[in-house]
Amino acid sequence: MPQEVIVARGLRQSYDGKRFALNGVDLSVHKGEVFGLLGKNGAGKTTLIKVMTTLIRASSGELQILGMDPVHRGKEIRSRIGVVQQGESFDFTSVEGNLDIYGVLWGVPKGLRQQRREELLHRFEIEDIRKERSFDLSGGQKRRVQVAREFMHDMDILFLDEPTVGLDVIMRRKLLDSIREQVRGGLTVLFTTHNLEEADYLCDRVAVIDSGRILVNDTLENLKRRYGGKRTIEVTVALSDAEAYFEALRHRLSDQASVRREGGSGLILTSDVRGALGHITELASAQGAQIEWLNVRKNTLEDVFLKTVTHPPENDGAA
């Protein structure tokens, strides 16, 4: 059995005593895995990170981090984790000074601190800005420094709250590869992102959270297998009231497919492509709509995510 380094049971969090940002979260994360937490804005991802990193206390439920209760052993937990939050947190020092300060705060000996600083400056490609003030950096540069400085100290779990925001494609991939390298050494990563391609590339397991609840929690392979028999049909129609067309299509396909809008197009997730195509063309003819674009493709992790959020499974799949 994999060692569980994070275990949450019935976790609830309310800021006002009325609405729950977390509403009965059951979750476990295994040692040495990258666990992805996916959800819309306001779904509860950041709140869950804050509870797990001891920044706020849960209203109720049970939580163990590295076998410890955050309420009574928060300081010890904080000494063994790293956290990269969405917001910026910088001082007025240079980039290399920022790394040094983090090393000092974590009690890293001077020789090792200097060695790690140079390694991180090179790994995250920030050597050329080492003398610049952190506040003067671009958004992408600041993000690289934020992630790099967490590696100044040894840790068991790294919490990353959308760490690649502001990074270009090349730097994003390098960052993800760097995280993978650290995981091979035993690091556990809990990773939130809006970029589902990143989750597909990096994560061993993912959980989808919505309205403070975990809707599904499984390996990427199992999730794709679960929806493997389905296809996504993309369709765009030329019609003054396209919304009415897709609403009628949603009604027709309610028992066999899901229909959602994306810009001026509709996306239909179905296992009966032929039947859905028949309804699409018949309805277009009946409403005098011209089909401008029609495409059938295999499903991506994004399709799985959207299907889960719009049609939550009866069993939340928490593990």
Image (cartoon, rainbow, N blue to C red):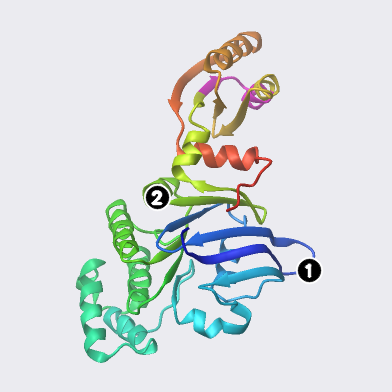
Residue 198 badge? 2
Residue 202 badge? none
Q: Position of residue 122 (x, y in %)?
A: 20, 70
Q: Amino acid at mark 2?
A: Glu
Magenta stretch holds residue 237 = yes
Q: Position of residue 185 (x, y in %)?
A: 31, 66
Residue range (magenta): 235-247
Please identify the residue farthest to the front as the structure is shown.
1
Nearest the camera: 110 or 126? 110
Magenta stretch holds residue 105 = no
Quarter of the image holding residue 239? top right
Residue 17 badge? 1
Q: CA distance from mark 1 to mark 2?
A: 35 Å
Judge whether 209 appears above or below 101 on screen.
above
Image-based side of 76 in relation to 17, left or right: left
Q: Position of residue 132 (x, y in %)?
A: 27, 78
Mark 1 burial class by Cα count in 10 Å: few <14, some 14-19, many 20+: few
Q: Can residue 131 be seen here?
A: no
Quarter of the image holding residue 124? bottom left
Local secondary structure at mark 1: loop
